[in-house]
Amino acid sequence: MPGLLRGVARTAVIAGTATGVRNRVTKRQSERWAEQEGYEQPVGLTATEAPAPTAPAQDSAIDQLRELGQLREQGILTEEEFAAQKAKILAS
């Protein structure tokens, strides 16, 4: 049973991180499109509107980096995957 709970916890952390990243990317894309001349907003979407998260969004980059570090320590992420995600978080 502890293995099942650990798996569920990992999935929740990964889903939360993915949701946070997706929301930031969507917002950034909307803002860039809004800055372009002649851009028409897609129907039903605004530049400030973000999709509702399925898991709690991260409050800060430090929290995200901590979670990524934990995933790396648990063997879920490789060093290369960790470095790539870390670069994305620090670039935002």
Image: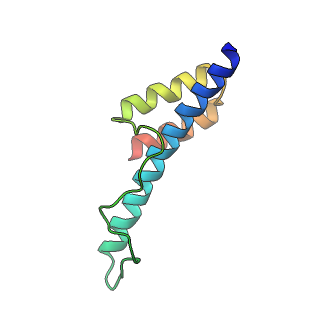
Quadrant containing the N terminus is top right
From the viewer's perspective, tell me whether residue 42 is left or right of residue 46. Answer: right
Q: Residue at x 37, y 70 (%)?
A: 45
Where residue 15 appears, x then y in whole percent? 54, 39
Q: Residue at x 42, y 56 (%)?
A: 51
Q: Residue at x 39, y 36 (%)?
A: 58
Q: Residue at x 34, y 35 (%)?
A: 60
Relative to 28, is 11 above or below?
A: above
Where residue 12 appears, x then y in whole percent? 55, 32
Residue 33 placement: quadrant: bottom left
From the viewer's perspective, tell me whether residue 85 is left or right of residue 44. Answer: right
From the viewer's perspective, tell me whether residue 74 is left or right of residue 87. Answer: right
Residue at the extreme top = 2
Residue 40 placement: quadrant: bottom left
Relative to 84, is 40 above or below?
A: below
Where residue 32 appears, x then y in whole percent? 35, 68
Residue at the extreme front = 1
Residue 4 placement: quadrant: top right
Relative to 64, is 4 above or below?
A: above
Where residue 27 appears, x then y in whole percent? 37, 59
* Visual colour scheme: rainbow
Q: How many marks?
A: 0
Of 57 and 31, the residue lying toward us? 57
